Image (cartoon, coloured by chain):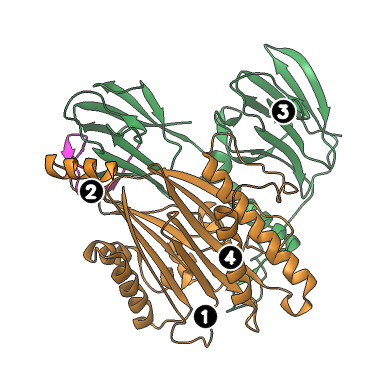
Amino acid sequence: MAKLSLMFENKLVKEVPIGSRPVSIGRSPDNDIPIDNLAISNYHARVYYEAGRLVVEDLDSLNGTFVNDLRVERATLHDGDSIWIGKHNIKVDATGDAAIPWDSGRKAAAPKINETMVLDTKARRDMLQQAAALGERSQFSPGRLKMPTLVVLSGKVDQKEYVLTNKLTVIGKSPMATIRLRGWFKPKMAAQINQRDDGYYLGTGDKVPTVNGTPISGTIRLNDGDLIDVCGVRMNFIIRE
Amino acid sequence: MEIVSGGVSDVGRVRTNNEDSYQILDSLSLFILSDGMGGEAHGEVASALAVETIVKCCTEPKNDSGATLVDSAEVHWAEKTKRLQHAVRQANFNIYESARKNPAQRGMGATVTTAWANEGKLSVAHVGDSRAYLLRTGNLQQLTNDHSLVAEQVRRGIITPQQAEESDMQSVLLRALGAHEDVDVDVDEVGIFSGDVLLLCSDGLTRMVTEPEIAGSLQAETIPAKAAQKLVDLANERGGLDNVTVIVVRFQEPAKGWFSWLRRGSKNKD
């Protein structure tokens, strides 16, 4: 049977077998793997079998779940993988599992329909599995999520860097702003960054930001390494692996 | 913050009944939109029940009637966000139970998208493919992720957004109210800025009208009720293949300046 080994500073803390029930990980003591550390959310992540594959799923934790250094929302686990949660490492031992083959090339079989319908659990599982199998080979797979970060190079703001996690990020003086500008005469909302399915987009607010020295018009998609200037603040947009 | 809203629901040009339901509670700044499904007029029952349940859960003094539904809501959400999430789960349960007790209603379900504004913050909860958008300084941003098969495939990089628009699988939902005893509800919180425009709409709008057109209409017409009507008209001009329902909400800081500040001050004293 597969198992998870919780390690802290290279010492084995706890070993938990993975059965048919999901293994929960979090700060709350009722987790299967409780980790008493403030960096860890109450219900941080869980590991379970889905169609013969071991899957880790982040439960919208504050500080994230990492598999072999990549931040993931959901990812398939393989033997020898390391799940990182805070400073804790959970080693994955998936030996003894029968690998279940499947044909990913097949097109999802579904009836042609005009009326809205909801997939029942089994049909949904099948379709998503096929989707997952295909998606895994693509670079956009959710298991290969990256962390877009704004690193502040100069200017008065409340933090040195910001990991963009929300759909809407506002740069401005407003208390609602994620990136809070300091100083007199700064606008409430100087600019905004929107998360879309295909990336992050910078848009104007009360000011027109410049990207790599050129003022933007409308919205533009940010690329790794872009230099953003707005209201006397210079930031570097980088995508952390 | 001044909040002005308007909503319109229309049967469209093809269907004979309107399975959408919506409600605007200006006193609470609560907005609910639901798109029902399941033939023989039961879609209406489901969407109406969804709206009714959410209104009830959000207006009644907090009670523990739903204590059986263990809330998995993350601790960091605001109280109203958690309450909204709970209300949507309760709506799911009520639809599920109604269909279970009444065999004629079997298979009925609904989507729901709901937003609640409070203290400069907008709580959004949704299940299904009815969307919430926010227009801010000309940028239209979708606040919700569709729980549809094609949207999931786009997120996973399997198909392109263009392929999704042409797909014959667009009506396949991965999540809806009433399908199971419990449901995962997506919630989010967004800070509100003066000038923001919130749009809630059923898929009858988004399948007929493109996002740039929606953004254009919302910018051109500043009276929410008129903007909502304009969007519905546009969907109908394009064929009106489905019921279409639209709620538009505009957030505006009252005009600034010493004079209005003094006036506001005296109003508060009354």
Q: Please give the name of the residue rendered at 21% of the width and 23% of the height, measured from the top-left corner.
A: A183
**Residue linked to disc 4:** B52
Closer to the chain start, of discs 1 and 4, is 1
In 3D space, how far apart are the residues under numbered discs 3 and 4 (Cα atoms)?
51 Å
Q: Position of residue B99 (x, y in %)?
A: 74, 71
In the rendered image, residue A208 lying in the magenta stretch gets the answer yes
Q: Residue at x 33, y 31 (%)?
A: A179
Quadrant placement of the C terminus of chain B: top left
Picture coordinates of residue B238, whole percent (x, y): 36, 81
| Residue B245, horizontal then vertical, whole percent | 44, 72
| Label number found at residue A80 | 3
Instruction: Check disc 1 and report the residue beneath it.
Output: B18
Q: Earlier in the sequence, mark 2 or mark 4?
A: 4
> Nearer the viewer's eye, disc 1 or disc 4?
4
Q: Colour of chain B?
A: orange
Residue B97 placement (x, y as % from top left): 75, 65
The subunit letter for the residue under badge 1 reads: B
Left or right of B163, for residue A65: right
Alpha carbon of mark 2 to alpha carbon of mark 4: how far? 32 Å
Residue placed at 55% from the left, 62% from the top?
B112
Classify mark 4: residues with Cα within 10 Å, few (<14), some (14-19) or many (20+).
Answer: some
Tell me the CA gap for discs 3 and 2. 60 Å
In the rendered structure, are the residues bearing label 3 and label 2 in contact, judged by CB atoms less than 8 Å apart? no
